[in-house]
Amino acid sequence: MEPRLCFGSCTRCGEAVFSAGGACKAMGHLFHNTCFTCSVCNKQLKGQPFFTVSGHIYCEDDFLFSGVHPSEETCYSCGSSITDLARIFLFTRMSSPLCKPSCLKQLKLHIQVLQARGKSYHPTCFHCVVCRQELQGQAFAVDSDCRVYCVTDYHRVQSPLCGACRKPILPTEGSAESIRVASCNKYYHVECYSGEVSLI
């Protein structure tokens, strides 16, 4: 009988690993293929994406959808868990007779978290408070109460009123800046201001 070559011991079960074909190395540790499995569903993970949390190993599905995700993203606008919304969407799609088995993978890869102002949002929840336009990838402005506006509505709502005509002082078309005259704690459109300029 030929002596078997030992590659080391399995991190999970502690037994010797004799066959390179029946073993894998992950996170700097040696495992039997049968021991390198998800802590929740026991799916073998050799060659598969996996995640570790507090020493436990998880397949992608269980990491994302079984509550082990270490820092669940919560939408700042609606307060719902971003992964819970995806789970509801998946359940709805899986109930559909038109759904194909390949959909499950596609849907999980398309969960989006929009990061803005140091907060997390569903992309559909990050919108202007006035016109409800989604602002993903768009310029936006925030008022002193942290409400989010598209640039147009921000200027329309937050712009000072002209001391003469009482209309908002808006930026000229194609510009993000408004030009105004300030005098005696009031603002004026340039064309509405009739006071004299004193250089003293």
Image (cartoon, rainbow, N blue to C red):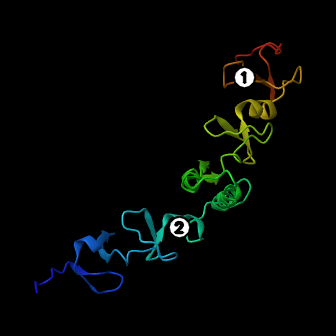
Q: Residues within 10 Å of mark 1 (few under 14, many from 20)?
A: some
Which quarter of the figure is the C terminus placed in? top right
Q: Is residue 90 above or below residue 143?
A: below
Query: In the displayed structure, does residue 17 sit left or right of residue 107?
Result: left
Which residue bears the numbered disc 1? 171
The numbered dot on residue 63 is 2
Is disc 2 placed on a helix, strand or loop? helix
The answer to whether marks 2 and 1 mark residues whose Cβ atoms lie closer than 8 Å is: no
Amino acid tagged 2: Phe
Viewer-proximal residue among 185 and 73: 73
Is disc 1 placed on a helix, strand or loop? loop
Query: In the displayed structure, does residue 181 sit left or right of residue 140?
Result: right
Query: In the displayed structure, does residue 12 sit left or right of residue 185?
Result: left
In the image, residue 107 lies at what x, y percent?
Answer: 59, 53
Amino acid tagged 1: Pro
Query: In the displayed structure, does residue 61 sit left or right of residue 45?
Result: right
In the image, residue 67 lies at what x, y percent?
Answer: 60, 71
Which residue appears farthest toward the left when viewing the image? 2
**Could you give the CA–CA distance between mark 2 and mark 1, rounded to whole angstroms?**
48 Å
Which quarter of the figure is the N terminus placed in? bottom left
Identify the image quadrant of residue 20: bottom left
Q: Is residue 184 above or below residue 21?
A: above
The residue mark sitting in front, 2 or 1, is 2
Q: Is residue 197 above or below residue 53?
A: above
Which residue appears farthest toward the right when viewing the image? 165
In the image, residue 102 lies at what x, y percent?
Answer: 55, 53
Viewer-proximal residue among 123 and 37: 37
Q: Residue at x 78, y 42 (%)?
A: 129
